[in-house]
Image (cartoon, coloured by chain):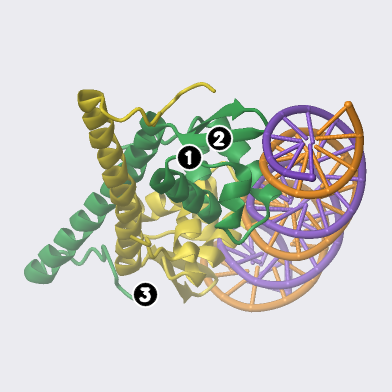
Chain colours: A yellow, B green, C orange, D purple
Amino acid sequence: MSLLVDDDLWSAVGDPTRRRMLDLLLSEGSGTATSLSERLPVTRQAVAKHLVVLDRVGLVRATTAGREKQFRVDEAQLARAVAQLTDVGAAWDSRLRRIKRIAETIQRGRDTNDNGTGQKQ
Amino acid sequence: MSLLVDDDLWSAVGDPTRRRMLDLLLSEGSGTATSLSERLPVTRQAVAKHLVVLDRVGLVRATTAGREKQFRVDEAQLARAVAQLTDVGAAWDSRLRRIKRIAETIQRGRDTNDNGTGQKQ
DNA sequence: GGAAAAACGCAACCGACGGTTGCGCATGGC
DNA sequence: GCCATGCGCAACCGTCGGTTGCGTTTTTCC
């Protein structure tokens, strides 16, 4: 009921650029700040900042090799993020279903003159 | 594949305070900036700003009655947002599954020395 | 009817964030 | 050894979430 959501994880995934970065890393296996920036509409420095954020919440991990720093997705952590997305979605969905069911019941019943919905003043 | 996500809708839902506001509006049916702010750790003005954002993307609608401005969730639009959450989640989930399957195949086969996944430099 | 209170809107301000430009430093190829 | 490549650090800018302060309108109540 209380939707225990890790706000850090969520907000990490909340940024559209970071989502595209995760998409790229997933589809290509790994990438550096430079390689990712070539496929994104932002500069390398912006990508590097996002990588710091993603690393801080554990969604990616880096392996330094010489002058290159390869990043790849931490699959377990991304799975956790996905679970949170679907959890919140499911919670809202169930509430919406319940509301719709109640609305239909009222529509059928018409015993209560409690003005439940869109009554304009 | 391209995950056509409405960034405005997503970012509206991306903020934790706005998520809590939607939760409150769903569970209580409706609310004003003042009533919501009493149940949130932020001021009325902050809530009012968030309501503007939510209204702009169509997630809530307002009905003014005298000095009060009642907000309620637009269920169809929230349903769209939920669909986007689950879509992105499903896309990542399927990629994760595919990666895991490939990893297992490599683990079993050991014919390719193409270092596809978690090979530490 | 008039004063106080309740609800709202507007504006200024502040810190954090996404993004850019510019520079310096290390590593690798020739 | 030299130069290109990749990265990190710092300064700066606009936007956003949040606050405080003040003014306006509507309701309440004597």
User: Which residue is label 2 attached to?
Assistant: B70
Using a 10 Å C-alpha cutoff, classify the residue at mark 2 as few (fewer than 14 neighbours), some (14 to 19) or many (20 or more).
Answer: some
Q: Is residue C27 above or below residue A46?
A: below
Q: Residue placed at 26% from the left, 62% from the top?
A: B116
User: Looking at numbered disc 1 in the image, what kind of residue is underneath it?
Assistant: Ser
Cα separation between marks 2 and 3: 59 Å
Which circle's residue, 3 or 1, is located before the other in the chain? Answer: 1
Q: Looking at the picture, tell me which residue is in the foreground, A113 or A32.
A: A113
Q: Position of residue B20 (x, y in %)?
A: 48, 53
Q: Is residue A62 above or below residue D27?
A: below
* CB contact under 8 Å: marks 2 and 3: no
Q: Residue placed at 48% from the left, 35% from the top?
A: B72
Quadrant housing the N terminus of chain A: bottom left
Q: Position of residue B19 (x, y in %)?
A: 47, 50
Quadrant of residue A84 within the rendered picture: bottom left
* CB contact under 8 Å: marks 3 and 1: no
User: Which residue is label 1 attached to?
Assistant: B30
Which circle's residue, 2 or 1, is located before the other in the chain? Answer: 1
- Chain letter of disc 1? B
- Helix, strand or loop at label 1? It is loop
Quadrant housing the C terminus of chain A: top right
- Chain letter of disc 2? B
Q: Is residue B46 above or below residue A30?
A: above
Q: Which mark is residue B121?
A: 3
Which circle's residue, 2 or 3, is located before the other in the chain? Answer: 2
Judged from this view, the residue extending furthest toward the left is B108
A6 displayed left or right of B117: right
Q: Looking at the picture, tell me which residue is in the foreground, A69 or B113.
A: A69
- Helix, strand or loop at label 3? It is loop
- Chain letter of disc 3? B
